[in-house]
Structure formats: structure tokens, C-alpha cells
Image: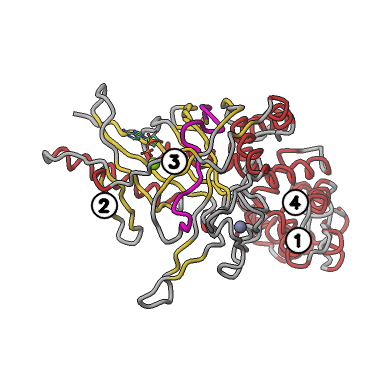
Amino acid sequence: MSWEVVIGLEVHIQINSKTKAFCGCSTQFGAEPNTQTCPVCLGMPGQLPVLNGESVQKTILTGLAINADINLESRFDRKNYFYPDLPKGYQISQFTVPLVDGGYIDIPTKDGEKRIGVTRIHMEEDAGKSMHEGLEAVSHIDLNRSGVPLMEVVSEPDMCCADEAIAYLKQLHQLIRFLNVSGGDMEKGQFRCDANVSVRHPGEPLGIRAELKNLNSFRFIKQAIDYEVMRQIELIEDGGTVVQETRLYDSVKGESRSMRSKEEANDYRYFPEPDLPPLRVSQAEVDAIRAGMPELPGALRKRFEGEYGLSPYDADVLTQTRELSGWYEQLVAAHPQDPKRCANWMANELLGRLNEQGVDIAHSSVNAVALAALINRIDDGTISGKIAKDVLDAMIESGKTADAIIEEKGLKQVSDTGAIDALIHDIIAASPQQVEQYRGGRDKLFGFFVGQVMKATKGQANPAVVNERLKVLLAG
Ligand code: ADP
Ligand code: MG
Ligand code: ZN
């Protein structure tokens, strides 16, 4: 009997607001431990939280971008649990009425687009961090992260394999960076995923799920889900039953272990947060946020395919971030004759080199106007496409313009028929055997002569002119 896999994801996203969710402390990553704290985020009794408006706006923006409903009145609740990194003993979250309800994200699958439902997006605050590394017999607590604003995006159990889960996460990750609501840096914990996984036979009701925590890279998420699916199927086929539990994935061992089962599960005893009034936003505020929404990745991709004739692959690469798409549009503005060639030079040549060096486009030493100038030098015959790649290397290294490098290194393409004819005459004189064989019908030798001319000109002869002149002069 066949198995069906069911996956629902909960994603915690750090909102990139300058200050924390309920106090004025900085959210800057990487500061000395406990230097960005105050009585509110340290959980001192009697301190009152004041809600950060920017994080509300960014959560609404995210909701609008996934076609969700915005609740004009939502509520804050306390999620109570004990942990050393949570000094208040509770986390402020939204339980009964979240700010954002519903919505969806369309993902690419091998059978075309699939719509994944989003249940809700609610606001909450992050906890601090326990530090164990380099310490013996003690742990330290850093509360800089305590109170950093988060939004939690909860999906419907609509995904049916690890690949779909990853596709959903990638769409969401791209979206939040496009909207500039989060840096999305997974290594810094700005985008964290819990995966709920169950299996069933087709037509049966939902199976019992396990929740996988501690997933901080796309690769581990896929591995952890695949492992969990196998574990559950084997367990059931061996006559066992899946229990509802939280499991931790160990990426080194490639397996997961139980962290807590339903019986020991946290009973959070949510209750209304008495220190914060209901959150009210007006329809006018929501409309204003909608009006300021940037063009979203999906629309941009379609426009790049339609307006510029890009392949789906190139359109996808160039719309990964707003920096990339903006850079590409500057390039096209500077070289409007051939948007496809622009895409090729940017995606394959420039980005390929920058990726190798671990540099992102925002820090590229070559800007869009400079790359357009290089492409222009191919168009006007000054250099060949092959030489242009060397020029690009030098541009990246030195930050100089294409013209300066072509001049400096004497790379100008030789298109002058007289000079090329003279070279060909020399080569013909030096290779009597080859000439005889070619004239006797060995057409393949034509490449030999092209190679000789290129060698003599260090690749700088105009290939079209070389071909044409060789045909004429070799004919005898
Ligand atoms: P909790 O509050 O315990 O985390 P929720 O009902 O909010 O539980 O569900 C959390 C996530 O689990 C959601 O993303 C939901 O889609 C997913 N989920 C619920 N039931 C299942 C199931 N049987 N199999 C897989 N995922 C599920
Ligand atoms: Mg959960
Ligand atoms: Zn504070």
C-alpha cells in the first residue's frame, strides 16, 4: 500500500527593525553579550511593554504580499514557560487573534505551480540565548536577543514531500527579503523553521505528526524531513505507532531523537497579555502599506521573461533579490539593445565570478554602467567576446573601466584587413604542406589556419574577418 506524506511548516522570522518589539533597545547582531538590554527586555517586574510600530507594519506588509486578511483588531497573549533564556517566564505572542489570517504562497513543482495555504502570521518576541561553547560546567545567558521582534508564519499541512517544503521555504525566504522585512540570514537565526511531518495512506485522515526542531539550513531541513518520513513508515510497517512528539535533528549523525513527547509537552497556559491593549490598525493604514508594496518576485520574474525575453532560468536568477533585479534593470537601461545578452553577461560571467569570490552584487567593484560599456566594446568590434572575459576579470580585480584596460593591455581587436592579410600570407608561406592538403580537399584544416592567425595575434584578430580573408586567400 502506498504512503502519502503530509508536511506543515512553522517559520520564525526576525523582523529587521532597529529596536526591539517592546522596548527601545538595539537589535544589532553580534554585540557584546548583555549590552543591548533594559529593564523591559530583562523582564524586571513592573516594567511595561510599548509596542514597536515598525514591526507591526512589516508584518502587515508580509500578510498583504501573500494575499492574507489583516485583522484590524488583534490581541497579544502570554505564552508561559520556564527556560533560563526567558527572564519574564513568558513570551509575548499572539494566540487567540493574530494580526494576519490566511493567505497563500505559490510554489514551483515538477507538475507546475502548487498553492500552499498559510494559516496565520502572528507577532511575538524572541528569547535570549544560552551560551555553552568554551565553558565548563556552566552556561551563560546572553539577553541581547531577548525581545527582538519576530513574526511566525504558520502553513497549512499542504506540502507532500521535502522538495515542496524547501520550495515553500525558498519562496517565503525570497519574499521577506524582497519586502525588506527581514535579513533572512539563516546562520544568524533570522529565519528558523520547525517542520511538522506525518504519513498516511491515501484517503485516510491526517496521521499523527512529529515536530522537527533545530533546522537551520535548507539542506538540513530536507535531510531531516526525509529521515523522519522513513522513520515513521518503517515504524508503522513494523506494527508500531507514531507518537506526537518534538524531535531534534542531529545533522552530524543524520538522525533525529525525541526531545519531548505529548505527555511531557509544554502546557503553555496562554492567557491575555494585560499590559498591552488590543492592537488596532485602521483600514487607511493598511491601504497605505499596500500602496507602498514593491513589485513582488513572481511578478518581476514574469515581467523579465515577457519584457526582456529572458529564459525562465535567467529570470529566476536575476530576481533572487531586489539588489539583483535592480542591478539588471540598470544594466539594460545602459545597454538597451540586447537585454538577453545583458542577462547572460550578468548572470553567467559577472555573478559567476563574484560568487567564486564570495562577493555579493551590492559590493561588486564593477557597476552596471561599467559592464554595459564592456558589452558595447564587443558590439562595436573593439574586442571579441573571448577577450572581453579577460577584460572583465581585470575590471573586477582593479575596478578600472573596460576602455582603460583595453588601452593599457593593448587588447584592441585587429579588424584591419591589410594587417590580417599580411599575417595570412606569412602563415601560408610557413605551412606549405597544410596548404596543399587543404587545397586538395581536407576542409578540416581550415581550423588549423584560424588557430594560427589567432595565435599570432594573441586572440585579438576579429574572427569574422579572419574567416573571410582565409577563405579568399587559401583559395589561392
Ligand atoms: P502547535 O500549536 O502544536 O504547533 P498547530 O495546530 O498550530 O500545532 O500546527 C502547527 C503546524 O503543524 C502547522 O503548520 C500545521 O499545518 C501542521 N500540522 C498540523 N497537523 C499536522 C499533521 N497531521 N501532519 C503534518 N503537519 C501537521
Ligand atoms: Mg508548533
Ligand atoms: Zn530592552
Q: Is mark 4 within 8 Å of ligand 1?
A: no
Q: Could you classify mark 2 by the number of other residues whose Cα lies within 10 Å: few (under 14), some (14-19), or many (20 or more)?
A: few
Question: Which one is earlier in the sequence, the residue at label 1 or at label 4?
Answer: 1
Question: Which one is earlier in the sequence, the residue at label 4 or at label 3?
Answer: 3
Question: Which one is earlier in the sequence, the residue at label 3 or at label 1?
Answer: 3
Please tell me the numbered disc located at residue 10.
Answer: 3
Question: Whole-Å distance between the Cαs marked 2 and 4?
Answer: 66 Å
User: Which quadrant is the N terminus positioned in?
Assistant: top left
Question: Whole-Å distance between the Cαs marked 2 and 3?
Answer: 19 Å
| Image position, residue 42 (x, y; %) | 54, 60
Front in this rendered view, residue 270 or 99: 270
Question: Which one is earlier in the sequence, the residue at label 2 or at label 4?
Answer: 2
Highlighted magenta segment, given as a residue range: 86-104
Q: Amino acid at mark 2?
A: Ser
Judging from the image, what secondary structure is the residue with disc 4 in? Answer: helix
**Contact, mark 4 vs mark 3 (Cβ under 8 Å):** no
Q: Which residue is mark 1?
A: 365
Q: Which residue is mark 4?
A: 463
Frontmost of labels 2 and 4 is 2
Question: Whole-Å distance between the Cαs marked 3 and 1?
Answer: 39 Å
Q: Which residue is mark 2?
A: 258
Q: Amino acid at mark 4?
A: Pro
Determine if residue 442 is in view. Answer: no
Front in this rendered view, residue 5 or 189: 189
